[in-house]
Image (tube, rainbow, N blue to C red):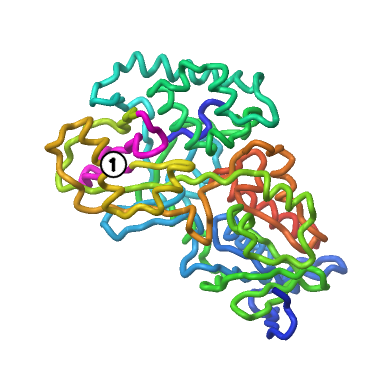
């Protein structure tokens, strides 16, 4: 699935836990008066891919590193559910552009198998189950790319993508195919169109090459990176005090101290303000946390006893309402023994699905599929779903350039404080925000900052 294809509490009285210098082997490398890496303790908050990458990089340089993870498992938004006998990647699922992408090499090292999901293997159905000609679809898609390449010239800092697009292309704004294309090619990759910046919607770099989906679970990468690392699970961080010589991190009623702390929680968690920073974070960082957007994408995996759908990779459906259950990934194309489709809900409609029951979700999905394939098709025998917006450890899927966002905000989110408090995560990577590779690179970036201080 193509990503950005068109662009490219106080601490007094609590026990203090000091990280032991013997936790990890000391470095044999001579250093300056700052002390050798083996004498330096680092706490990484969060065991997502950015936290794991940072911890691994630092450990390899001899630092004493502990990761504090709020959940009972590692991986963050790299999360794979295997309860139905098929790998269901709840968060990241694709390597977006394999050429030069660090995840390509990392996946190979981790033993993550992947396969290309060709975008041109598709069928599109209009409301009423009418098959849309490939020529009509392809023409609209190419026109969309042309518009997206230049529409920002009509944008303004206070106007959303939706406002500008509707003003400039009113006939397309209400066309079912165009609503689908905007939903699947823009909203999915960025965020809510009525909140998306009309100036910065196409920001961010991309890697070339095929789009490949994980076969045996994206969490294989997290497990690979975590080997040999000290990860403390079920440790929810509630406060970070960086006003003293040592940074103090409060987790589960305990205070741990370290020379350096790297905060890698998702932007949604920072927005929720569940971690108290003392002193308060600099205004530039607070402003960036507020201004950068956080999208919501939810996934739904449905399994049947037999397949009734087209033998193509992607099946699209264009009802009046977009952003919900209009795009179907045919899992059977790369897992022939599994009769499954995966569908999606984005942005505000994605958030709304989280209050619906499983039965209500299946009913809505089946309304769309029955309009395509007829009322005789069976209901699925199983379903798995995600709820990223109400997940207290994420509050969304990934960051995007909302109205009011400036690209400097991503750098502000990445800015270290007093050479002791550091920040990583996809939302801190100005060139590769909203991606797994961006999160991975950000962890290495912050680790290298600490290494350079020695």
Judge whether residue 110 can be spotted in this image.
no
Please tell me whether residue 322 belongs to the stretch shown in magenta.
yes
| Image quarter of residue 247 | bottom right
Q: Is residue 36 left or right of residue 166?
A: right
Q: Which residue is at 53% across, 61% downward?
A: 393
Q: Position of residue 237 (x, y in %)?
A: 62, 70
Q: Assess disc 1: are there few (<14), some (14-19) or many (≥20) residues with their C-alpha within 10 Å of its C-alpha.
A: some
Query: Taking 265 as reference, is 157 above or below it?
Result: above
Query: Taking 223 as reference, is 109 above or below it?
Result: above
Tell me the SS state at disc 1: helix
Q: Which residue is at 27% across, 37% downward?
A: 333
Instruction: Tell me where the magenta segment starts and ends, as one range.
Output: 320-342
Q: Residue furthest right?
A: 33
Q: Quadrant of the C terminus?
A: bottom right
Judge whether residue 150 can be spotted in this image.
yes
Q: Position of residue 206 (x, y in %)?
A: 57, 33
Residue closer to the observer: 257 or 29? 257
Q: Is residue 189 left or right of residue 405?
A: left
Please tell me whether residue 324 belongs to the stretch shown in magenta.
yes
Q: Which residue is under mark 1?
A: 365
Q: Position of residue 85 (x, y in %)?
A: 26, 57
Residue closer to the observer: 35 or 204? 204
Q: Position of residue 447 (x, y in %)?
A: 69, 57
Q: Which residue is at 52% across, 64% downward?
A: 226
Q: Which residue is at 42% across, 46% downward?
A: 93
């Amino acid at each position: 699935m193509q990503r950005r294809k068109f662009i490219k509490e106080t601490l007094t009285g609590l026990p203090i836990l000091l990280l032991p210098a013997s936790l990890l082997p000391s470095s044999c490398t001579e250093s300056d008066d700052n002390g050798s890496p083996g004498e330096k303790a680092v706490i990484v908050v969060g065991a997502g891919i950015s936290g794991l990458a940072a911890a691994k990089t630092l450990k390899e340089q001899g630092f004493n590193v502990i990761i504090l993870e709020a959940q009972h498992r590692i991986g963050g938004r790299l999360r794979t559910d295997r309860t139905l006998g098929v790998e269901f990647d709840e968060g990241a699922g694709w390597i977006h552009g394999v050429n030069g992408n660090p995840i390509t090499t990392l996946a190979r090292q981790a033993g993550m198998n992947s396969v290309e999901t060709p975008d041109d293997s598709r069928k599109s159905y209009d409301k009423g189950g009418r098959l849309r000609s490939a020529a009509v679809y392809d023409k609209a898609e190419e026109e969309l790319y042309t518009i997206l390449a230049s529409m920002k010239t009509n944008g303004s800092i206070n106007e959303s993508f939706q406002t500008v697009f509707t003003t400039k292309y009113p006939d397309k704004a209400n066309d079912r195919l165009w609503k689908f294309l905007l939903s699947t090619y823009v909203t999915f990759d960025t965020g809510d169109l009525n909140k998306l910046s009309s100036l910065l919607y196409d920001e961010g770099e991309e890697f070339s090459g095929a789009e490949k989906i994980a076969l045996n679970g994206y969490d294989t990468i997290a497990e690979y990176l975590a080997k040999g690392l000290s990860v403390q699970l079920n440790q929810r961080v509630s406060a970070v005090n960086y006003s003293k010589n040592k940074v103090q991190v409060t987790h589960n009623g305990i205070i741990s101290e370290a020379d350096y702390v790297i905060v890698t929680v998702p932007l949604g968690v920072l927005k929720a303000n569940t971690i108290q920073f003392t002193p308060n974070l600099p205004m530039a960082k607070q402003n960036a946390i507020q201004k950068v957007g956080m999208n919501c994408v939810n996934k739904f995996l449905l399994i049947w006893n037999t397949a009734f759908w087209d033998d193509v990779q992607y099946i699209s459906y264009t009802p009046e309402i977009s952003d919900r259950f209009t795009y179907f990934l045919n899992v059977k194309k790369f897992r022939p023994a599994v009769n499954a489709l995966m569908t999606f809900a984005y942005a505000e409609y994605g958030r709304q699905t989280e209050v619906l029951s499983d039965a209500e979700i299946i009913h809505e999905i089946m309304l769309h599929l029955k309009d395509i394939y007829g009322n005789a098709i069976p209901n699925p025998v199983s379903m798995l779903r995600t709820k990223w917006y109400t997940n207290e450890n994420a509050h969304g899927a990934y960051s995007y350039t909302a109205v009011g966002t400036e690209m400097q905000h991503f750098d502000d989110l990445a800015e270290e404080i007093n050479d002791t408090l550091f920040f990583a995560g996809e939302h801190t990577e100005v060139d590769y925000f909203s991606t797994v590779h961006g999160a991975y690179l950000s962890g290495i970036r912050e680790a290298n900052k600490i290494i350079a201080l020695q």
